[in-house]
Structure formats: structure tokens, C-alpha cells
Image: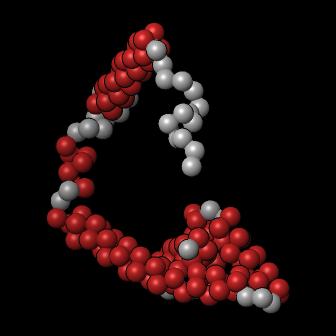
Amino acid sequence: MADTSNSVLFDAPGPKGRRTIRIVNWIAALIFVAVLVLVLMRLHNPPDGENQLSWELWKPAVEREAWTDFYLPGLWMTIKATVLAVVGAVVFGLVFGVGRLLPNPLVRGISTVIVEFCRAVPVLLLMIFFWRWFAFAGLPSPSYWAVVLALVLYNGSVV
């Protein structure tokens, strides 16, 4: 077994290097704080608009109606979609994972193409594609089923 204590990409910095790193870190932190203060000042007092940090603008987001009409139903739909996607991904991954292990070259090749395609396409792109396709086909809740199917395909292909 190789000694991993000596296998580093570069030597540890000496006293001058540590001092330089400390100075650069402080400068970066000060720049970050300055930019954050400028953004907050701009939101608080924009030149041609309303104060974006005013409580009147944020109040509807924390009222009871927001919770009963948006947050809790959204959380429930997220939980339902997650459970369906997990179960579907396990089934998809099991079927195509076994298909990639079979000795038949046709089945192995088809399974490999499907899995690699689903791994290569970004999940958001799959969601948008299925959402438009399901909406065009007239399915009920196209956004919900698009999310579920995209998660099944992607997560099942990386299982």
C-alpha cells in the first residue's frame, strides 16, 4: 500500500504563502460583504421603484392563505411525486440494469443505449419535453407526470 501522506498536488504553503492566503481571504470577504451591502441598499431604496424589502410586499408570502393554498399542497405533491419516482426508478433501474448484464447482445445493446441516453440528457430538459408532450396529448396534470417520469428515467438510469 502506498503512503498517501506524501501524495499531494503541491507542497504545504510556508509562512509567506499562509500570510498571502490570509490576506487574499480577507480581501475576498470584504468584497463579498461590500457587494452584499450594495445589493441590500439597492433593494431597500431603488432609484425608480418601490422598496423591495418592505413588509407589505413580503406579508402575503407568510399569511395563512399562502400556506393552505400553495406551500402545503406543493409539499404534498412533492412527496407524492418523490414516492412514485423512487419506486419507478428502482423498477426501471432493475429492469435495464439486468438487461445490461444479459448475454444477448441485442438486449444488452438496447438496454445500454436507453440507460446512457437517460443519463446524458439533463433532467430539466426531460421534464420540459414530457410536460409539453403530455400537455399536447391532453393528459391531466401534465406537469406532475412530467416530473415523475423524468425523475424515474434519470434516477433509474444512474441506479
On the image, the x and y values in percent for residue 4 come to 53, 41
Residue extending furthest right?
105
Camera-side residue of 95 and 9: 9
Left or right: 19 in relation to 89: left
Quarter containing the C terminus: bottom right
Seen at 78% across and 88% down, the residue is: 103
In this rendering, is residue 76 above or below 121? below
Left or right: 43 in relation to 8: left
Seen at 62% across and 88% down, the residue is: 95
In this rendering, is residue 6 above or below 146? above
Left or right: 81 in relation to 107: left
Camera-side residue of 3 and 158: 3
Camera-side residue of 42 and 9: 9
On the image, the x and y values in percent for residue 38 come to 35, 23
On the image, the x and y values in percent for residue 102 come to 73, 88
Seen at 64% across and 81% down, the residue is: 97
Left or right: 31 in relation to 92: left
Residue extending furthest top?
16
- Quarter location, residue 155: bottom right
Question: Does the image show residue 158?
Answer: yes
Seen at 26% across and 38% down, the residue is: 53
Figure label count = 0
